Image (cartoon, helix red, strand yellow):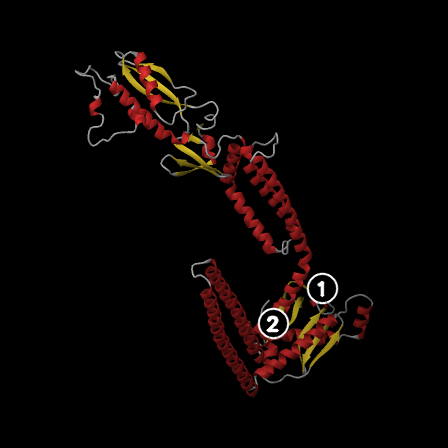
């Protein structure tokens, strides 16, 4: 619906107004016989042809809504009727030919006249029956709207009144500018006073202590509050001045009235909505308080299971912590679902739009997310990994520092933090070196290749002696030597030992390899790696007096023997 006073239409459509104004008198001048026929139930021979149109149109005049036209009269749509009436009103005001607004009723309709000119025809089809309107009510409201719009249009053609209105608007703008300047000055003065108070407080306390930090934070908070309050007052001043200025001029008076009414209605609506929302907010708060109590009680029980103070056949100590988190998350989700209908605005279109947007995000991103979450559940409840275990996952070896819902974090022997998605952990083979190390012991192998001319019993003894000299190895189960291969040129011997701590694996193996080399050199047994084709002229061993040749320094006894 638009302002018909701003639209241009062909002259032929303007002439249609004359057709309507000629049809109505013709109908009014029908014979008494025709009118008596209408009173018996049939339409009179001169009855006006009016029917409900598919779309209505609002007649605007001088920025004021006059009436909503909903009927098609003599084949003319509501928009055509509104355009014709608007042009006629503008012509009457321009010619200063306005007069009293009167009405003339007939069966099924009403003609609204200005002076002696009929400007608008209202029929029963223009009435909104669903809203409970009647033709008399619509006519009365239209007359009131027309009188006000015509009065303002005549006022706009009076230069003396326009000068006075412009003067009042200028004074209002000047007053608003002065008020804004005073508010800015007051803001600076209040800010300076707050800063002085804060400096005095900081001078009374230790500048490096907690009191100074609190005073600084308090000053920042006071500045934020002051800025927000002053900004709100500035907006109120600007809004009030704009409303006053718009209401001074006839054409913009409707906008000023709507701004004033909008502010009052907004405040009223917000207040009423807040009052109506109190029962729902109380219900939501009660649901969240109950959920918080249940979550705390469940967390206390799961913590007791984790620390061994409580026992349950269906949960293990290592799965107590993730189960606690999962239970808390499910309880809060259930609380949100239960409290959703009681939340203020939950039935609004905006709230529903946000819900649909979040649902689409979860739908589009759920494939990979659900895969990672389910893999995390599988890792957790299969107890495949524990925090603190030394493990190998694929090519990654290190200590588990975190087992999360989406990923697992490992600290390598080089002190690198490696993040592995849970789906990757599930898809690869995981070796845990710590799980059985405390009870049964986990063997760690290391291999050497020795020629067939070396007595295998001597090789066994040297390897076991090297294990005995190495710190960081467990005495039980005892180290053992296995001949794992009879190759073309040498025998492959594998020494298996149990480490006391798996996270020191690299350091323990380094010490063990050093002791193996020292002992084999000391007893003249040649290590045959890499492969060789012919026997050397002299054994490939290092004499003991050259073990610490420059720039080497004396090694600890654990490696020296």
Q: Nearer the viewer, residue 428 or 415?
A: 415
Residue 271 sits in which quadrant? Answer: bottom right
From the viewer's perspective, is 296 left or right of 220? Answer: right
Q: Position of residue 231 (x, y in %)?
A: 51, 69
Decide: few, some or many residues near mark 1? Use Cα within 10 Å; few <14, some 14-19, many ≥20: few
Decide: few, some or many residues near mark 2? Use Cα within 10 Å; few <14, some 14-19, many ≥20: some
**Split into 4 quadrants, where in the image is the C terminus?**
top left
Q: Position of residue 346 (x, y in %)?
A: 63, 53
From the viewer's perspective, is 344 left or right of 454? Answer: right
Residue 76 visible to an observer of this rendering: no
Q: Is residue 475 above or below residue 403?
A: above
From the viewer's perspective, is 371 left or right of 328? Answer: left
Residue drawn 43% across and 31% down? 390
Q: Nearer the viewer, residue 111 or 357?
A: 357
Q: Which residue is mark 2?
A: 258
Q: Position of residue 513 (x, y in %)?
A: 31, 25
Residue drawn 53% across and 30% down? 382
Q: Which residue is mark 1?
A: 131
Residue drawn 45% across and 26% down? 437
């Amino acid at each position: 619906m638009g302002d018909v006073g701003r639209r241009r239409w062909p002259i032929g459509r303007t002439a249609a107004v004359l057709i309507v104004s000629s049809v109505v008198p013709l109908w009014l001048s029908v014979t008494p016989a025709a009118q008596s026929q209408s009173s018996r139930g049939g339409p009179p021979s001169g009855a006006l042809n009016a029917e409900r149109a598919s779309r209505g149109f609002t007649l605007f005049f001088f920025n004021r809504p006059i009436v909503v036209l909903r009927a098609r009269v003599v084949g003319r749509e509501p928009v055509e009727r509104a355009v014709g009436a608007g042009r006629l009103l503008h012509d009457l005001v321009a010619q200063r030919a306005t007069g009293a607004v009167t009405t003339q009723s007939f069966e099924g309709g009403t003609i609204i006249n200005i002076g002696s000119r009929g400007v608008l025809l209202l029929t029963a089809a223009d009435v909104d029956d669903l809203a409970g309107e009647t033709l008399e009510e619509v006519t009365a409201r239209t007359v009131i709207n027309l009188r006000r719009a015509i009065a303002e249009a005549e006022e706009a053609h009076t230069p003396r009144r326009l000068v006075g209105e412009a003067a009042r608007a200028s004074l209002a703008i000047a007053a608003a500018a002065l008020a804004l300047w005073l508010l800015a000055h007051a803001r600076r003065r209040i800010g300076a006073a707050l800063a002085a108070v804060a400096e005095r407080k900081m001078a009374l306390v230790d500048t490096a202590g907690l009191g100074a930090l609190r005073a600084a934070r308090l000053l920042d908070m006071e500045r934020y509050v002051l800025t927000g309050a002053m900004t709100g007052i500035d907006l109120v001043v600007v809004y009030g001045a704009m409303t006053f200025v718009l209401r001074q001029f006839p054409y913009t008076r409707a906008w000023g009235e709507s701004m004033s009414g909008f502010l009052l209605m907004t405040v009223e609506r917000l207040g009423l909505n807040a009052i109506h929302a109190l029962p729902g907010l109380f219900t939501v708060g009660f649901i969240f308080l109950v959920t918080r109590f249940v979550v705390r009680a469940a967390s206390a029980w799961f913590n007791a299971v984790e620390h061994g103070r409580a026992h349950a056949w269906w949960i293990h100590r290592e799965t107590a912590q993730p189960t606690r988190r999962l239970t808390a998350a499910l309880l809060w989700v259930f609380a949100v679902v239960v409290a959703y209908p009681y939340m203020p605005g939950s039935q609004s279109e905006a709230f529903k739009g946000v819900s649909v947007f979040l649902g689409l995000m979860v739908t589009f991103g759920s494939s990979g997310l659900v895969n990672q979450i389910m893999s995390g559940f599988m890792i957790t409840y299969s107890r495949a990994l524990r925090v603190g275990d030394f493990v190998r996952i694929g090519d990654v070896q290190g200590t588990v520092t975190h087992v999360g819902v989406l990923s697992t974090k490992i600290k390598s022997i080089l002190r690198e933090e490696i993040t592995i998605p849970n789906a990757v952990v599930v898809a690869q083979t995981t070796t845990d070196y710590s799980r059985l190390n405390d009870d049964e012991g986990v063997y760690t192998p290391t291999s050497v290749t020795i020629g067939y001319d070396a007595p295998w019993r001597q090789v066994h003894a040297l390897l076991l002696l090297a294990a005995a000299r190495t710190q960081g190895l467990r005495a039980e189960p005892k180290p053992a030597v296995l001949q794992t291969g009879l190759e073309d040129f040498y025998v492959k011997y594998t020494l298996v030992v149990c480490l006391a701590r798996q996270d020191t694996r690299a350091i323990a193996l380094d010490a063990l390899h050093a002791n193996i080399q020292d002992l084999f050199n000391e007893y003249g047994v040649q290590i045959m790696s890499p492969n060789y084709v012919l026997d050397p002229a002299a054994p490939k061993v290092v004499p003991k007096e050259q073990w610490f040749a420059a720039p080497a320094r004396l090694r600890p006894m654990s490696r020296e023997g």
